[in-house]
Amino acid sequence: MAPLGRTPPALNRRPRLERILERDGPTCTWCGQRFEGLRRPTTEHLVPRVKGGPSWLENEVAACRRCNRERGHAALGEWADECERRGWAVDRQRVVRSLEALDAAIDTRGGQRRARPWLAAQLRRLRRTTG
């Protein structure tokens, strides 16, 4: 564990993905499909890098390649609504839990000035729609 205010050392892509799968389970956050056969997991940044989102475990969830690609930089609530219109089993609680962990990590480590407003807006919207 890194000291307070310090970013922990970055993990390479494979160990990060393994940690995310251990934390969240072997299903896509957006469509709910299990990762097996040709359906491979990827790391999905909840707060996109273009919005200032860091490459921290708290900002990443597992998503299949299709969902990761199709979401692009869409807002989380809008993308979750679209996935549900398609009949997919979105794990909104996983998304909220990850965003709350990211918010806490930013409070501890500091920085991420560009990500904070976007993160706050996404959390507000998702908390209203998550039961």
Image: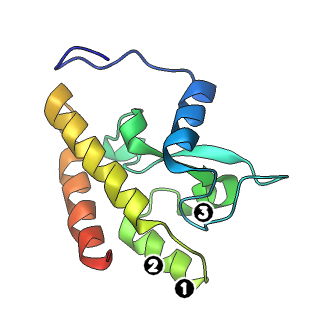
Q: Residue at x 44, y 63 (%)?
A: 74
Residue 86 appearing in the image: yes
Q: Quadrant of the N terminus?
A: top left
Say left or right for 61 vs 15: left
Front: mark 2 or 3: 2
Residue occupied by mark 3: 70
Task: Identify the secondary structure beneath mark 3.
Answer: helix
| Picture quadrant of residue 102 | top left
Q: Residue at x 25, y 55 (%)?
A: 118
Q: Amino acid at mark 3?
A: Glu
Front: mark 3 or 1: 1
Task: Identify the secondary structure beneath mark 1.
Answer: helix
Q: Amino acid at mark 2?
A: Asp
- Image position, residue 38 (x, y; %): 83, 52
Instruction: Give the colour scheme shown.
Output: rainbow
Q: Quick one: label 3, few (<14), some, or many (20+) residues within 10 Å? A: few
Where is 22 relative to 24, above or below?
A: above
Residue occupied by mark 2: 81
Where is 58 relative to 98, above or below?
A: above
Q: Quadrant of the C terminus?
A: bottom left
- Image position, residue 19 (x, y; %): 53, 33
The answer for how far apart the CA atoms under marks 2 and 1 are is 6 Å
Ranked by sequence position, the earlier of labels 2 and 3 is 3
Task: Identify the secondary structure beneath mark 2.
Answer: helix
- Image position, residue 42 (x, y; %): 63, 44
